[in-house]
Amino acid sequence: MGIVSKAIGRIASIVLDLDDTQLPQDQIAALNDFLAKHKFEAATKNLDDFLGMLKKKHLVDSITVSSAGEMIASSEGNGISDNFSSVALVEFVTKQLSKPDTILLKMPNGWHMIFPFMQKIYIVKAGTNLSTIELKALAKEIDAFLKSKGIKNKKNGKIIGKAF
């Protein structure tokens, strides 16, 4: 009788489109706990503090921003080498394929994501890869901060970032 009732229940759930799945309460609790412990203060005036906040908020290891081959900002001070190799890679991929949306590289120590957006190249390193939506959100936050502070790159006269 147990097999027949399970079969009828299965058929009924398919026909009636019943969904008995539940929200992952353990995962939601863990995320809420994480968010309660970490405050993301976006009202900072310092670029290094802002990039540090974004690293925590988006759970990434480093962020580098460049424009026209010149480094604008780096969260870890490794921006010059990251910038050089990333610009060369973007140019190579653009010549071989077409304009890339995102270049994802799986490295032994995590992911390197190269994301051209709004005439800038964003280089993000993290333990896991970020979606295009997450990368765009990160880029928009940085772009808005740079515009609000009037920060320009080295070529335009203002020198910023840890690598300088």
Image (cartoon, rainbow, N blue to C red):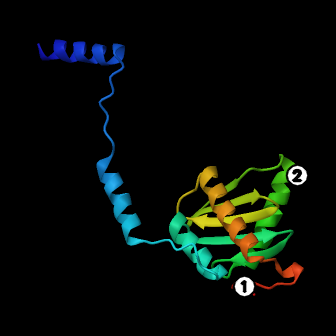
Q: CA distance from mark 2 to mark 1?
A: 29 Å
Determine which of the numbered discs, if any, sits on residue 95 in the image: 2
Say left or right for 33 vs 135.
left
Q: Position of residue 151 (x, y in %)?
A: 77, 77
- Residue at the image point whose x is 82% and y is 49% from the top: 99
Q: Position of residue 118 (x, y in %)?
A: 79, 59
Say left or right for 39 vs 126.
left
Q: Amino acid at mark 2?
A: Lys
Classify mark 2: residues with Cα within 10 Å, few (<14), some (14-19) or many (20+).
few
Q: Position of residue 31 (x, y in %)?
A: 38, 59
Tell me if residue 71 comes above or below residue 57 in the rendering. Answer: below
Q: Amino acid at mark 1?
A: Ala
Classify mark 1: residues with Cα within 10 Å, few (<14), some (14-19) or many (20+).
some
- Assign the C terminus to one quadrant of the image: bottom right
- Foreground pick, 40 / 107: 40
Q: Position of residue 34 (x, y in %)?
A: 38, 65
- Residue at the image point whose x is 60% and y is 55% from the top: 134
Q: Earlier in the sequence, mark 2 or mark 1?
A: 2
- Assign the N terminus to one quadrant of the image: top left
- Residue at the image point whose x is 86% and y is 68% from the top: 68
Kind of element beneath mark 1: loop
Picture quadrant of residue 21: top left
- Foreground pick, 138 / 107: 138
- Residue at the image point whose x is 71% and y is 60% from the top: 114
* Image depth: mark 2 or mark 1 in front: 1
Tell which residue pokes out farthest to the bottom in this image.
164
| Residue 59 visible (yes or no) | no
Q: Give the residue number, with chain letter if any, for mark 1.
A: 163
Tell me if residue 50 comes above or below residue 24 in the rendering. Answer: below
| Residue 18 visible (yes or no) | yes
